[in-house]
Amino acid sequence: MASVQFDDFPPLNPDFLPRDAVIAIDGPAGSGKSTTARALAEIFGLLYIDTGAMYRSLTQAALGEGVSPGDESALAALLENASLELKPAKGEVSVFWNGKDVSRAIRTPEVEAAVSQVSSHPAVRLNMVERQQVIGRQGGVVMEGRDIGSVVFPLATAKIFLSASLEARVDRRYKQYQQRGLRVSRDDLRTDLAERDRQDSERKTSPLVVSPDALVIDSSDLNLDQQNEVCARACLVNPTLDLELETDVESSLRNMPWHYRLAFAVFSSLARFFSLREVGNEEGTLPRGCIVAVNHISNWDPPLVGSTFRRHPVHTLAKAELFKFWPLGPIFRWIDSIPIQRKGYDAAAFQEASKRLADGSNLLIFPEGTRRAIGHPGPVRNGLGILVQATRAPMLPVFIRGSYGRKPGGSHESPLEVRYGPVIRWHGLPTLLEKHDKKEISGKVGLLCESVFRELQARSFAETPQTMFERELGAKQVKKFAIRQKQVFRA
Protein backbone atom coordinates (compact mmCIF):
# COMPACT_ATOMS: atom_id res chain seq x y z
CA MET A 1 0.00 0.00 0.00
CA ALA A 2 1.59 3.28 -1.10
CA SER A 3 1.64 6.27 1.21
CA VAL A 4 -1.12 8.83 0.75
CA GLN A 5 0.05 12.24 -0.52
CA PHE A 6 -1.64 15.62 -0.01
CA ASP A 7 -2.89 15.64 -3.60
CA ASP A 8 -4.50 12.23 -3.07
CA PHE A 9 -6.64 13.38 -0.12
CA PRO A 10 -10.38 13.39 -0.84
CA PRO A 11 -12.10 16.72 -1.48
CA LEU A 12 -13.50 18.35 1.63
CA ASN A 13 -17.06 17.23 2.28
CA PRO A 14 -18.00 17.62 5.97
CA ASP A 15 -21.07 15.40 5.58
CA PHE A 16 -18.90 12.44 4.58
CA LEU A 17 -17.37 11.99 8.05
CA PRO A 18 -19.41 9.68 10.35
CA ARG A 19 -21.19 11.53 13.17
CA ASP A 20 -19.58 9.29 15.78
CA ALA A 21 -16.07 9.78 14.38
CA VAL A 22 -13.05 10.24 16.62
CA ILE A 23 -10.24 12.39 15.23
CA ALA A 24 -6.85 12.03 16.93
CA ILE A 25 -4.16 14.63 16.36
CA ASP A 26 -0.62 14.06 17.64
CA GLY A 27 2.53 16.09 17.20
CA PRO A 28 5.23 18.11 18.93
CA ALA A 29 4.66 21.31 20.93
CA GLY A 30 3.98 24.34 18.77
CA SER A 31 2.91 22.38 15.68
CA GLY A 32 -0.54 23.93 15.76
CA LYS A 33 -2.43 20.90 17.05
CA SER A 34 -4.82 22.87 19.25
CA THR A 35 -5.63 25.46 16.59
CA THR A 36 -6.26 22.83 13.94
CA ALA A 37 -8.23 20.60 16.32
CA ARG A 38 -10.59 23.49 17.08
CA ALA A 39 -10.96 24.17 13.36
CA LEU A 40 -11.76 20.51 12.61
CA ALA A 41 -14.31 20.42 15.40
CA GLU A 42 -16.05 23.41 13.82
CA ILE A 43 -15.84 22.05 10.26
CA PHE A 44 -17.28 18.63 11.15
CA GLY A 45 -19.56 19.64 14.02
CA LEU A 46 -17.62 17.64 16.63
CA LEU A 47 -16.67 18.29 20.25
CA TYR A 48 -13.13 19.57 20.76
CA ILE A 49 -11.26 18.05 23.72
CA ASP A 50 -7.98 19.80 24.56
CA THR A 51 -5.99 17.06 26.29
CA GLY A 52 -2.98 19.34 26.66
CA ALA A 53 -5.15 21.66 28.73
CA MET A 54 -5.92 18.75 31.04
CA TYR A 55 -2.23 18.23 31.81
CA ARG A 56 -1.65 21.98 32.07
CA SER A 57 -4.46 22.34 34.60
CA LEU A 58 -2.82 19.74 36.84
CA THR A 59 0.54 21.47 36.35
CA GLN A 60 -0.92 24.86 37.30
CA ALA A 61 -2.59 23.39 40.38
CA ALA A 62 0.65 21.69 41.42
CA LEU A 63 2.67 24.88 41.07
CA GLY A 64 0.03 26.75 43.06
CA GLU A 65 0.16 24.26 45.91
CA GLY A 66 3.92 23.86 45.94
CA VAL A 67 3.92 20.30 44.56
CA SER A 68 7.08 19.49 42.63
CA PRO A 69 6.58 18.54 38.94
CA GLY A 70 8.82 15.54 39.67
CA ASP A 71 6.75 14.18 42.60
CA GLU A 72 4.66 11.51 40.91
CA SER A 73 2.78 10.29 43.99
CA ALA A 74 1.83 13.81 45.11
CA LEU A 75 0.66 14.72 41.59
CA ALA A 76 -1.39 11.53 41.33
CA ALA A 77 -3.03 12.24 44.69
CA LEU A 78 -3.80 15.82 43.64
CA LEU A 79 -5.43 14.59 40.43
CA GLU A 80 -7.28 11.61 41.92
CA ASN A 81 -9.88 13.64 43.81
CA ALA A 82 -9.97 16.66 41.49
CA SER A 83 -12.89 17.71 39.35
CA LEU A 84 -11.59 18.50 35.86
CA GLU A 85 -14.01 19.77 33.22
CA LEU A 86 -13.58 20.97 29.66
CA LYS A 87 -16.36 23.09 28.22
CA PRO A 88 -16.80 24.35 24.66
CA ALA A 89 -16.09 28.08 24.32
CA LYS A 90 -15.27 30.60 21.63
CA GLY A 91 -11.57 30.47 20.87
CA GLU A 92 -9.72 28.20 23.31
CA VAL A 93 -11.60 25.63 25.36
CA SER A 94 -12.65 26.66 28.86
CA VAL A 95 -10.96 24.58 31.57
CA PHE A 96 -12.34 24.23 35.09
CA TRP A 97 -10.30 22.80 37.98
CA ASN A 98 -12.51 22.04 40.99
CA GLY A 99 -15.10 24.42 39.59
CA LYS A 100 -12.68 27.32 39.00
CA ASP A 101 -12.02 28.62 35.48
CA VAL A 102 -8.25 28.28 34.94
CA SER A 103 -8.30 28.76 31.16
CA ARG A 104 -5.84 31.70 31.20
CA ALA A 105 -3.79 30.57 34.18
CA ILE A 106 -2.68 27.39 32.39
CA ARG A 107 -1.28 29.26 29.35
CA THR A 108 1.75 30.84 31.01
CA PRO A 109 5.45 30.17 30.30
CA GLU A 110 5.86 28.73 33.83
CA VAL A 111 3.19 26.11 33.22
CA GLU A 112 4.52 25.49 29.70
CA ALA A 113 8.00 24.79 31.07
CA ALA A 114 6.80 22.23 33.64
CA VAL A 115 3.98 20.41 31.84
CA SER A 116 6.18 17.87 30.02
CA GLN A 117 7.63 16.60 33.29
CA VAL A 118 4.19 16.46 34.93
CA SER A 119 2.70 14.59 31.97
CA SER A 120 5.55 12.06 31.86
CA HIS A 121 4.55 10.27 35.07
CA PRO A 122 2.80 6.89 34.48
CA ALA A 123 0.29 7.37 37.34
CA VAL A 124 -0.71 10.79 36.01
CA ARG A 125 -1.08 9.57 32.42
CA LEU A 126 -3.11 6.54 33.47
CA ASN A 127 -5.66 8.73 35.24
CA MET A 128 -5.80 11.23 32.39
CA VAL A 129 -6.12 8.55 29.71
CA GLU A 130 -9.06 6.99 31.55
CA ARG A 131 -10.77 10.40 31.71
CA GLN A 132 -10.13 11.00 28.01
CA GLN A 133 -11.36 7.56 26.97
CA VAL A 134 -14.62 7.97 28.87
CA ILE A 135 -15.27 11.17 26.92
CA GLY A 136 -14.10 9.86 23.57
CA ARG A 137 -15.92 6.51 23.53
CA GLN A 138 -19.13 8.44 23.14
CA GLY A 139 -17.82 9.46 19.70
CA GLY A 140 -18.10 12.71 17.84
CA VAL A 141 -14.89 14.25 19.23
CA VAL A 142 -11.59 15.75 18.18
CA MET A 143 -8.68 15.15 20.54
CA GLU A 144 -5.12 16.41 20.32
CA GLY A 145 -2.03 15.61 22.33
CA ARG A 146 1.10 13.47 22.11
CA ASP A 147 -0.22 9.90 22.30
CA ILE A 148 -3.88 10.19 21.30
CA GLY A 149 -3.64 7.95 18.24
CA SER A 150 -1.17 5.43 19.64
CA VAL A 151 -2.43 5.05 23.24
CA VAL A 152 -5.66 6.87 24.04
CA PHE A 153 -7.65 6.06 20.89
CA PRO A 154 -5.90 3.38 18.83
CA LEU A 155 -9.16 2.87 16.88
CA ALA A 156 -9.69 6.52 15.95
CA THR A 157 -11.48 7.15 12.65
CA ALA A 158 -8.68 9.48 11.57
CA LYS A 159 -5.17 9.84 12.96
CA ILE A 160 -3.03 12.82 12.05
CA PHE A 161 0.55 13.44 13.09
CA LEU A 162 0.97 17.19 12.61
CA SER A 163 4.58 18.29 12.46
CA ALA A 164 6.59 21.40 11.59
CA SER A 165 10.20 22.51 11.75
CA LEU A 166 11.53 23.88 15.03
CA GLU A 167 11.86 27.40 13.60
CA ALA A 168 8.30 27.39 12.28
CA ARG A 169 7.02 26.29 15.69
CA VAL A 170 9.07 28.93 17.52
CA ASP A 171 7.55 31.60 15.28
CA ARG A 172 4.01 30.37 15.91
CA ARG A 173 4.46 30.12 19.66
CA TYR A 174 6.02 33.61 19.79
CA LYS A 175 2.99 35.08 18.01
CA GLN A 176 0.62 33.26 20.39
CA TYR A 177 2.31 34.82 23.44
CA GLN A 178 2.24 38.24 21.80
CA GLN A 179 -1.50 37.94 21.23
CA ARG A 180 -1.97 37.16 24.93
CA GLY A 181 0.06 40.19 25.92
CA LEU A 182 3.01 38.14 27.21
CA ARG A 183 6.62 39.12 26.51
CA VAL A 184 9.04 36.27 25.84
CA SER A 185 12.38 35.77 24.13
CA ARG A 186 12.59 33.85 20.85
CA ASP A 187 15.82 32.25 22.04
CA ASP A 188 14.15 31.10 25.25
CA LEU A 189 11.22 29.70 23.25
CA ARG A 190 13.60 27.83 20.93
CA THR A 191 15.44 26.33 23.91
CA ASP A 192 12.19 25.39 25.67
CA LEU A 193 10.63 23.77 22.57
CA ALA A 194 13.80 21.82 21.78
CA GLU A 195 13.92 20.56 25.36
CA ARG A 196 10.24 19.60 25.26
CA ASP A 197 10.84 17.70 22.03
CA ARG A 198 13.64 15.80 23.76
CA GLN A 199 11.57 15.04 26.88
CA ASP A 200 8.47 14.05 24.93
CA SER A 201 10.41 11.74 22.60
CA GLU A 202 12.61 10.09 25.25
CA ARG A 203 10.18 9.58 28.12
CA LYS A 204 9.46 5.95 28.96
CA THR A 205 5.70 6.33 29.32
CA SER A 206 3.80 7.18 26.13
CA PRO A 207 6.62 8.94 24.27
CA LEU A 208 5.90 11.17 21.30
CA VAL A 209 5.87 8.83 18.28
CA VAL A 210 4.32 8.60 14.86
CA SER A 211 1.64 5.93 15.06
CA PRO A 212 2.18 3.49 12.16
CA ASP A 213 -1.34 4.18 10.86
CA ALA A 214 -1.23 7.99 11.15
CA LEU A 215 -1.25 10.38 8.21
CA VAL A 216 1.86 12.55 8.65
CA ILE A 217 1.44 16.21 7.68
CA ASP A 218 4.41 18.61 7.73
CA SER A 219 2.89 22.09 7.93
CA SER A 220 6.15 24.07 7.95
CA ASP A 221 5.35 25.68 4.60
CA LEU A 222 1.58 25.91 5.06
CA ASN A 223 -0.34 28.87 6.36
CA LEU A 224 -3.07 28.24 8.92
CA ASP A 225 -5.93 28.01 6.42
CA GLN A 226 -3.96 25.56 4.27
CA GLN A 227 -3.02 23.48 7.31
CA ASN A 228 -6.64 23.24 8.45
CA GLU A 229 -7.87 22.32 4.97
CA VAL A 230 -5.25 19.62 4.45
CA CYS A 231 -6.00 18.11 7.87
CA ALA A 232 -9.75 18.21 7.24
CA ARG A 233 -9.28 16.36 3.96
CA ALA A 234 -6.98 13.87 5.71
CA CYS A 235 -9.85 13.01 8.08
CA LEU A 236 -11.78 11.66 5.08
CA VAL A 237 -9.05 9.30 3.79
CA ASN A 238 -10.10 6.21 5.78
CA PRO A 239 -13.87 6.72 5.31
CA THR A 240 -13.21 6.99 1.56
CA LEU A 241 -11.15 3.80 1.53
CA ASP A 242 -13.89 2.06 3.53
CA LEU A 243 -16.24 2.61 0.58
CA GLU A 244 -14.11 0.14 -1.39
CA LEU A 245 -14.84 -2.69 1.05
CA GLU A 246 -17.12 -5.41 -0.29
CA THR A 247 -20.43 -5.90 1.49
CA ASP A 248 -22.22 -8.48 -0.70
CA VAL A 249 -21.84 -11.48 1.61
CA GLU A 250 -24.13 -13.87 -0.26
CA SER A 251 -22.32 -13.63 -3.61
CA SER A 252 -18.98 -13.83 -1.83
CA LEU A 253 -19.95 -17.11 -0.18
CA ARG A 254 -21.19 -18.55 -3.48
CA ASN A 255 -17.90 -17.70 -5.16
CA MET A 256 -15.71 -19.27 -2.48
CA PRO A 257 -14.15 -22.73 -3.10
CA TRP A 258 -16.36 -25.62 -1.97
CA HIS A 259 -14.07 -26.69 0.87
CA TYR A 260 -14.21 -23.16 2.31
CA ARG A 261 -18.01 -23.21 2.21
CA LEU A 262 -17.97 -26.60 3.94
CA ALA A 263 -15.54 -25.41 6.61
CA PHE A 264 -17.62 -22.28 7.15
CA ALA A 265 -20.79 -24.39 7.56
CA VAL A 266 -19.09 -26.61 10.16
CA PHE A 267 -17.60 -23.70 12.08
CA SER A 268 -20.89 -21.78 11.97
CA SER A 269 -22.72 -24.75 13.48
CA LEU A 270 -20.10 -24.84 16.23
CA ALA A 271 -20.59 -21.12 16.88
CA ARG A 272 -24.36 -21.50 17.15
CA PHE A 273 -23.91 -24.45 19.52
CA PHE A 274 -21.94 -22.24 21.90
CA SER A 275 -24.13 -19.13 21.26
CA LEU A 276 -21.34 -17.01 19.81
CA ARG A 277 -22.11 -13.29 19.61
CA GLU A 278 -20.64 -11.24 16.74
CA VAL A 279 -20.03 -7.50 17.05
CA GLY A 280 -18.92 -5.14 14.29
CA ASN A 281 -19.09 -7.72 11.49
CA GLU A 282 -22.65 -7.17 10.36
CA GLU A 283 -21.76 -6.76 6.68
CA GLY A 284 -18.72 -9.03 6.69
CA THR A 285 -16.63 -6.25 5.16
CA LEU A 286 -13.04 -7.14 4.49
CA PRO A 287 -10.44 -5.92 1.97
CA ARG A 288 -8.51 -8.42 -0.11
CA GLY A 289 -4.98 -9.16 0.99
CA CYS A 290 -5.68 -8.31 4.63
CA ILE A 291 -3.99 -9.47 7.83
CA VAL A 292 -6.66 -10.60 10.30
CA ALA A 293 -4.99 -10.22 13.72
CA VAL A 294 -6.70 -12.01 16.63
CA ASN A 295 -5.83 -12.22 20.33
CA HIS A 296 -5.37 -15.75 21.66
CA ILE A 297 -6.83 -17.27 24.84
CA SER A 298 -7.87 -20.81 23.87
CA ASN A 299 -7.29 -23.58 21.32
CA TRP A 300 -10.93 -23.04 20.31
CA ASP A 301 -10.13 -19.57 18.98
CA PRO A 302 -9.35 -20.54 15.33
CA PRO A 303 -12.61 -22.36 14.52
CA LEU A 304 -14.76 -19.89 16.46
CA VAL A 305 -13.19 -16.87 14.78
CA GLY A 306 -13.28 -18.77 11.47
CA SER A 307 -17.04 -19.10 11.83
CA THR A 308 -17.34 -15.34 11.34
CA PHE A 309 -15.45 -15.21 8.00
CA ARG A 310 -17.73 -14.71 5.01
CA ARG A 311 -15.45 -13.79 2.12
CA HIS A 312 -12.17 -14.45 0.34
CA PRO A 313 -9.83 -17.40 0.94
CA VAL A 314 -8.21 -17.15 4.37
CA HIS A 315 -4.86 -18.74 5.15
CA THR A 316 -3.82 -19.24 8.77
CA LEU A 317 -0.36 -19.11 10.31
CA ALA A 318 -0.43 -22.06 12.72
CA LYS A 319 2.31 -23.50 14.93
CA ALA A 320 4.21 -26.27 13.17
CA GLU A 321 3.63 -28.73 16.03
CA LEU A 322 -0.05 -29.06 15.05
CA PHE A 323 0.83 -30.49 11.65
CA LYS A 324 2.62 -33.51 13.17
CA PHE A 325 -0.52 -35.21 14.44
CA TRP A 326 -3.23 -37.07 12.58
CA PRO A 327 -5.89 -35.97 11.73
CA LEU A 328 -4.94 -32.37 12.62
CA GLY A 329 -2.18 -32.17 10.03
CA PRO A 330 -4.34 -33.09 7.01
CA ILE A 331 -7.19 -30.90 8.27
CA PHE A 332 -4.97 -27.86 8.69
CA ARG A 333 -3.48 -28.34 5.21
CA TRP A 334 -6.98 -28.83 3.76
CA ILE A 335 -8.03 -25.39 5.03
CA ASP A 336 -4.81 -23.85 3.68
CA SER A 337 -2.97 -23.27 6.95
CA ILE A 338 0.71 -22.37 6.85
CA PRO A 339 3.00 -24.05 9.42
CA ILE A 340 5.37 -21.75 11.27
CA GLN A 341 8.23 -22.45 13.67
CA ARG A 342 7.79 -20.14 16.64
CA LYS A 343 11.40 -20.14 17.82
CA GLY A 344 13.51 -17.79 15.75
CA TYR A 345 12.58 -16.36 12.36
CA ASP A 346 10.84 -18.82 10.01
CA ALA A 347 11.73 -17.27 6.65
CA ALA A 348 9.84 -19.89 4.62
CA ALA A 349 6.59 -19.34 6.52
CA PHE A 350 6.79 -15.55 6.21
CA GLN A 351 7.62 -15.82 2.52
CA GLU A 352 4.59 -18.04 1.93
CA ALA A 353 2.36 -15.75 3.98
CA SER A 354 3.57 -12.67 2.06
CA LYS A 355 2.92 -14.43 -1.24
CA ARG A 356 -0.65 -15.29 -0.24
CA LEU A 357 -1.33 -11.70 0.82
CA ALA A 358 0.07 -10.42 -2.48
CA ASP A 359 -2.26 -12.81 -4.32
CA GLY A 360 -5.28 -11.21 -2.61
CA SER A 361 -5.92 -13.90 -0.01
CA ASN A 362 -6.37 -12.95 3.62
CA LEU A 363 -4.13 -14.15 6.42
CA LEU A 364 -5.31 -15.07 9.92
CA ILE A 365 -2.62 -14.73 12.58
CA PHE A 366 -2.46 -14.77 16.36
CA PRO A 367 0.27 -12.13 16.77
CA GLU A 368 0.84 -12.82 20.48
CA GLY A 369 2.40 -16.10 19.37
CA THR A 370 0.81 -18.25 22.07
CA ARG A 371 -2.16 -18.18 24.43
CA ARG A 372 -2.41 -15.30 26.89
CA ALA A 373 -4.10 -14.92 30.26
CA ILE A 374 -7.77 -13.92 30.05
CA GLY A 375 -8.14 -10.16 30.37
CA HIS A 376 -4.42 -9.55 29.71
CA PRO A 377 -3.80 -9.27 25.94
CA GLY A 378 -0.23 -8.86 24.66
CA PRO A 379 2.61 -8.59 24.20
CA VAL A 380 2.55 -8.86 20.41
CA ARG A 381 5.52 -10.54 18.76
CA ASN A 382 7.62 -8.95 16.01
CA GLY A 383 6.19 -11.25 13.34
CA LEU A 384 3.24 -8.93 12.73
CA GLY A 385 5.56 -5.98 12.11
CA ILE A 386 7.71 -8.06 9.77
CA LEU A 387 4.67 -8.95 7.66
CA VAL A 388 3.37 -5.38 7.67
CA GLN A 389 6.70 -3.97 6.48
CA ALA A 390 7.10 -6.66 3.81
CA THR A 391 3.58 -6.39 2.38
CA ARG A 392 1.95 -3.12 3.59
CA ALA A 393 -1.17 -5.28 3.94
CA PRO A 394 -3.94 -3.59 5.96
CA MET A 395 -4.85 -5.16 9.29
CA LEU A 396 -8.27 -6.11 10.57
CA PRO A 397 -8.12 -6.48 14.39
CA VAL A 398 -10.43 -9.05 15.99
CA PHE A 399 -10.95 -9.66 19.70
CA ILE A 400 -12.28 -12.98 20.98
CA ARG A 401 -13.67 -13.39 24.48
CA GLY A 402 -15.08 -16.39 26.33
CA SER A 403 -13.67 -19.23 24.23
CA TYR A 404 -11.91 -20.74 27.24
CA GLY A 405 -15.04 -21.17 29.37
CA ARG A 406 -17.52 -21.83 26.55
CA LYS A 407 -20.61 -23.95 27.28
CA PRO A 408 -23.36 -25.38 25.06
CA GLY A 409 -26.06 -22.74 24.74
CA GLY A 410 -23.79 -20.02 26.10
CA SER A 411 -22.33 -19.13 29.48
CA HIS A 412 -23.03 -16.18 31.76
CA GLU A 413 -19.67 -16.76 33.44
CA SER A 414 -17.74 -16.68 30.17
CA PRO A 415 -19.73 -14.75 27.51
CA LEU A 416 -18.58 -15.86 24.06
CA GLU A 417 -17.98 -12.98 21.67
CA VAL A 418 -16.00 -12.13 18.54
CA ARG A 419 -15.61 -8.36 18.17
CA TYR A 420 -14.32 -6.76 14.97
CA GLY A 421 -12.48 -3.44 14.88
CA PRO A 422 -12.07 -1.15 11.88
CA VAL A 423 -9.51 -1.80 9.15
CA ILE A 424 -6.11 -0.32 10.03
CA ARG A 425 -4.00 1.06 7.19
CA TRP A 426 -0.29 1.84 7.56
CA HIS A 427 -0.12 5.45 6.38
CA GLY A 428 2.74 6.34 8.72
CA LEU A 429 5.17 3.60 7.68
CA PRO A 430 7.13 5.64 5.09
CA THR A 431 7.90 8.29 7.72
CA LEU A 432 8.89 5.69 10.30
CA LEU A 433 11.20 3.95 7.82
CA GLU A 434 13.11 7.22 7.35
CA LYS A 435 13.99 7.44 11.06
CA HIS A 436 13.88 3.94 12.58
CA ASP A 437 15.27 0.49 11.83
CA LYS A 438 12.95 -2.36 10.94
CA LYS A 439 13.08 -3.98 14.36
CA GLU A 440 12.00 -0.73 16.05
CA ILE A 441 9.13 -0.38 13.58
CA SER A 442 8.01 -3.95 14.24
CA GLY A 443 7.90 -3.03 17.92
CA LYS A 444 5.74 0.02 17.19
CA VAL A 445 3.35 -2.04 15.07
CA GLY A 446 3.13 -4.60 17.87
CA LEU A 447 2.46 -1.97 20.53
CA LEU A 448 -0.33 -0.48 18.41
CA CYS A 449 -1.90 -3.92 17.91
CA GLU A 450 -1.75 -4.56 21.67
CA SER A 451 -3.41 -1.18 22.32
CA VAL A 452 -6.12 -2.12 19.83
CA PHE A 453 -6.76 -5.45 21.58
CA ARG A 454 -7.02 -3.65 24.92
CA GLU A 455 -9.44 -1.09 23.49
CA LEU A 456 -11.66 -3.78 21.95
CA GLN A 457 -11.58 -5.60 25.29
CA ALA A 458 -12.55 -2.40 27.13
CA ARG A 459 -15.49 -1.90 24.77
CA SER A 460 -16.59 -5.48 25.34
CA PHE A 461 -16.37 -5.07 29.13
CA ALA A 462 -18.30 -1.80 28.89
CA GLU A 463 -21.21 -3.63 27.23
CA THR A 464 -20.96 -6.88 29.20
CA PRO A 465 -18.94 -6.37 32.41
CA GLN A 466 -16.08 -8.73 33.11
CA THR A 467 -17.31 -11.64 35.21
CA MET A 468 -15.83 -12.94 38.43
CA PHE A 469 -14.94 -16.17 36.62
CA GLU A 470 -12.95 -14.26 33.99
CA ARG A 471 -11.25 -12.06 36.57
CA GLU A 472 -10.19 -14.90 38.86
CA LEU A 473 -9.12 -17.24 36.05
CA GLY A 474 -7.14 -14.49 34.34
CA ALA A 475 -5.30 -13.71 37.59
CA LYS A 476 -4.38 -17.38 37.99
CA GLN A 477 -3.16 -17.63 34.38
CA VAL A 478 -0.87 -14.58 34.37
CA LYS A 479 2.18 -16.22 35.94
CA LYS A 480 1.60 -19.58 34.27
CA PHE A 481 1.31 -18.07 30.79
CA ALA A 482 4.32 -15.79 31.32
CA ILE A 483 6.43 -18.88 31.98
CA ARG A 484 5.03 -20.55 28.86
CA GLN A 485 5.86 -17.45 26.82
CA LYS A 486 9.51 -17.69 27.87
CA GLN A 487 9.62 -21.42 27.17
CA VAL A 488 8.09 -21.12 23.70
CA PHE A 489 10.21 -18.19 22.48
CA ARG A 490 13.52 -18.77 24.25
CA ALA A 491 16.49 -18.96 21.92
Image (cartoon, grey):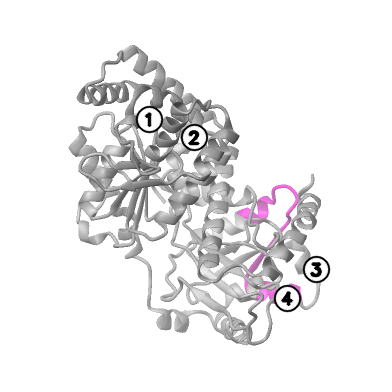
Mark 2 to mark 3 CA distance (whole Å): 52 Å
Circle nearer the viewer, 1 or 2:
2
Q: Circle 4 sits on which residue?
A: 330
Mark 4 to mark 1 CA distance (whole Å): 57 Å
Instruction: Check contact, mark 4 vs mark 2: CB within 8 A.
Output: no
Q: Earlier in the sequence, mark 4 or mark 1?
A: 1
The answer to whether residue 170 is visible is yes
Mark 1 to mark 2 CA distance (whole Å): 13 Å
Q: Is residue 316 left or right of residue 241?
A: right
What residue is rendered at 46% in x and 44% in y? 82
Instruction: Report the span colored magenta.
Output: 328-350
Mark 4: give few (<14), some (14-19) or many (20+) Cα within 10 Å.
some
Q: Circle 2 sits on which residue?
A: 119
Depth order, front residue of 479/293: 479
Q: Amino acid at mark 4?
A: Pro
Instruction: Check contact, mark 1 vs mark 2: CB within 8 A.
Output: no
Mark 1 to mark 3 CA distance (whole Å): 55 Å
Q: Earlier in the sequence, mark 3 or mark 4?
A: 3
Residue 147 drawn above or below residue 371:
above
Q: Amino acid at mark 1?
A: Ala
